[in-house]
Amino acid sequence: MRIDMGLVGAKINSPVEANNGRVLYYKVIAVLEAKRKGDDDGFRDAFEQLDIYTRQMYQQQHNLRFAWGITVSGTHVRVCLFGPDRAKSSLLIDISKPEGRRAFIKVLVHWSLCEESQLGRDPTMEYLRDLKCWQIACPDKAGSMGKGADVKYYYFTTVSCQADCLFGRHTRCFLATDIRPTEMVSDNNPLRPKFVIKDLWAFSKRNASEDTRDEVRSLEKVKACLLAKAAERDIIIPKIEVGGRVSFLRNGGWVEDNTDTLYGRGKLVADKADTVRGPGKLVTNKVDTVRGPGEMAEENADDVNELSELAENNADDANKPGEVRSDDDLYFRAHRRIVMEPIGEPLRSTTSVAEFVTVVCDVMRCHNAFVNDCSILHRDISPNNIIVFRRDD
């Protein structure tokens, strides 16, 4: 599938690598899709294409937290942000007018100067080119990763569950080891994974200590209640190694990775002043971002919101004077990583009806133990959450 244009990142004075006509999705920062039609249909067609291309970016960039996109329909441009739970776009930027060109150039300049985390990359994941494997940092306790001593590193080449959809839980799973390879990983020198790393954006409470839906807490409780009884009851339970919320360094400080960080928290309140409107004139409402104490929003998301000042004067896109646009209605999600064992196979790996029935019976026995011994009700026993583990005996 061929994109119209892709923006890639390169360090200053570094050579630009030729792509020979191929789409290098693992390098793309933002995809641009252009349509001749300058109406809503043109925007919708371009946006649908961006959906498809963004899935390809997520598949090939394991360290992609969110993705940028640009739609061009006629002389109208929109800047789009594809997050872990939704897509947002700016209002129309008319590049046939000086104000629109200035706003669009401002976004491009900001992208060229901002930190990689603001381009969507995850600073806690790094591809080690000399070893040909990925290094991923995981919280070493059930809390936010914020200190060097609280971080443990793992290494992987195998992705057992890819992020091939845009929204939802947006879960990736990696098969990893905690032993750093000393030589380049190859078919003759493969990594020997011991753990499953679950990387997800889950619904959460902003205050981690009040988060009753925290999967890390539930797994810690299962481990405490059932680990000693597992052999006696002949059941295999998921054993958590480490886990918690993900944070990263930005501007010299630690920032928790969540939807507040991506989109900004608070309300976008249109200015109370009168708005000058007329045929062909741009809406000039000024929009202020109100944030909570100590919060640091992604500046790129702020820029996209600021573009609403340049909206075309029409019923769909223009803000009315005094209108309140709220981002507080977004469900809060926190970026978590959980390291577990043992490594299993998906339910579809069962080879016979008898084996399938055995697996389902074992699942119900484990579920019964969770309820009776741990007072935990799973509530999501689906094929994607059932792992088949075959013992030697």
Image: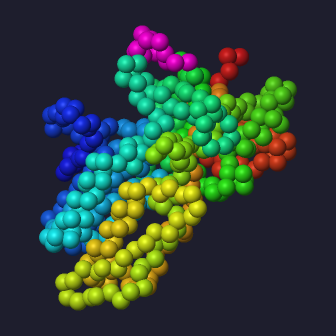
Q: Main secondary structure of the magenta part?
A: loop
Residue furthest top in the image:
188
Going 65% across and 27% down the picture, which residue do you hit?
Answer: 342
Q: In the rendering, at what x and y percent does residue 196 appear?
A: 58, 31
| Image vertical order of residue 170 relative to residue 234, above or below | below
Pick the quarter of the image with the N terminus. Answer: top left
| Image vertical order of residue 265 relative to residue 22, above or below | below
Going 60% across and 36% down the picture, which residue do you hit?
Answer: 147
Q: Is residue 185 magenta?
A: yes
Q: In the rendering, at what x and y percent does residue 95 appear?
A: 17, 67
**Figure quadrant of residue 224:** top right
Going 36% across and 89% down the picture, which residue do you hit?
Answer: 274
Q: What is the span of residues highlighted in magenta in the rendered image?
A: 179-191
> In this rendering, does residue 45 appear at all?
no
Going 53% across and 36% down the picture, which residue do you hit?
Answer: 173
In the displayed structure, does residue 212 sit left or right of residue 80? right
